[in-house]
Image: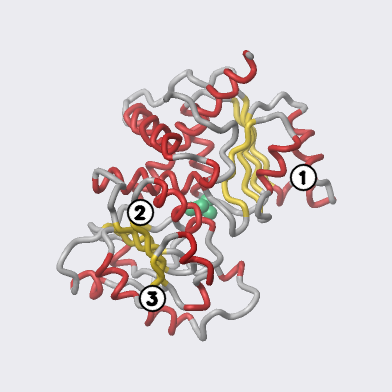
Amino acid sequence: MSELSVNHLLGIKHLNAEDIQLILDTATQFKEVINRPIKKVPTLRDITIANLFFENSTRTRLSFELAEKRLSADVINFSAASSSVKKGETLIDTVNNILAMKVDMVVMRHPNPGAGEFLAQHVDASIVNAGDGAHEHPTQALLDAFSIREALGTLEGIKVAIIGDIVHSRVALSNVLLLKKMGAEVMVCGPTTLVPKHMHTLGVRVEHNLQTAIEWCDVANMLRVQHERQDINHFPSIAEYRAQYGLTMDHLDALDKPIVIMHPGPINRGVEITSEVADSEHSVILDQVQNGVAVRMAVLYLLAEKRKLKNSK
Ligand code: CP
């Protein structure tokens, strides 16, 4: 198979295992390209992409923009904070105005779950979800999977513990869905108040003890406590959270095996992970960032190919 089964990347839930394999294999080829002295290819020369960010971002926004430029696409950037959204313009009006400038693809981050799906039903462009509220962050899960495969050679049978604020995390949900589709074993670990009650229905183990989780896993994906999405206090204090769920070098030294440490960023250093662990030889955190460019190049390329096929029919 050399084409995606979908016209948009709205969530991992819409992808099958072959789609995921195709994206990861295509990203491997693009990673080779971006490590060459000349990092640019003419692949998307005729394509215009709008990056619409209605929520803050560092890694995802820069990584998409770089991926688009490496593929020679024309790129326009929109940030809600400095736009007419502040004057009350709706999402559909905003996007239709941008599409009137002949835009082919839209990469969108939005605080509302399902914003990408809504857009895909109302506009003609190919939509890529760059994070929608606490729902999904599909390209993060794809780059995490790429990084695990790079570190350990496979996803099949690998034990991944996702640790921290699960309930507010789009990264957790997209990772669970992807890893299960690709044959990995998944555990989520965090305080009872930060793990949704339905989690076991997704076929994952639920654990509340950090030491047990890291003794079980091959990979620990440490998540940030998302204070900005919390309307109530889910734990008594940061100091208490750190004492129960903060990963330290002492935890890793007590293991009888090495484990791979991941974090999607931004990191709360000294809260969910110490600087010593984040910067250690066990950590692939900056590899994740580098792999994000190759994975996003693969997603954009494959969706553009799909769009070409659709338009030629
Ligand atoms: N991992 C991630 O989505 O980071 P940003 O919020 O900085 O894009």
Task: Name the amino acid, label 1.
Answer: Leu
Which-is-in-front pick, marks 3 and 2? 3
Q: Which residue is mark 1?
A: 91
Q: Residue at x 59, y 42 (%)?
A: 10
Q: Residue at x 64, y 17 (%)?
A: 311
Are discs 2 and 1 less than 8 Å apart at CB?
A: no
Name the N-terminal-most of marks 3 and 2. Answer: 3
Judging from the image, what secondary structure is the residue with disc 3 in?
helix
Q: Residue at x 39, y 51 (%)?
A: 179
Q: CA distance from mark 3 to mark 1?
A: 38 Å
Dot 3 beta carbon under 8 Å from ligand 1: no
Measuring from the top left, give residue 66's x and y in whole percent. Answer: 49, 35
Measuring from the top left, give residue 199's x and y in whole percent. Answer: 49, 66
Q: Nearer the viewer, residue 33 or 305?
A: 305
Q: Residue 307 is drawn in which quadrant?
A: top right
* Residue that extends furthest to the top in the rendered view of this protein: 312
Which-is-in-front pick, marks 2 and 1? 1
Mark sitting on residue 285: 2
Q: Which residue is mark 3?
A: 245
Left or right of 155 in this view: 172: right
Q: Categorize mark 2 by other alpha carbons within 10 Å: few (<14), some (14-19), many (20+).
A: many
Judging from the image, what secondary structure is the residue with disc 1 in?
helix
Q: Is residue 12 above or below residue 212?
A: above
Q: Categorize mark 3 by other alpha carbons within 10 Å: few (<14), some (14-19), many (20+).
A: many
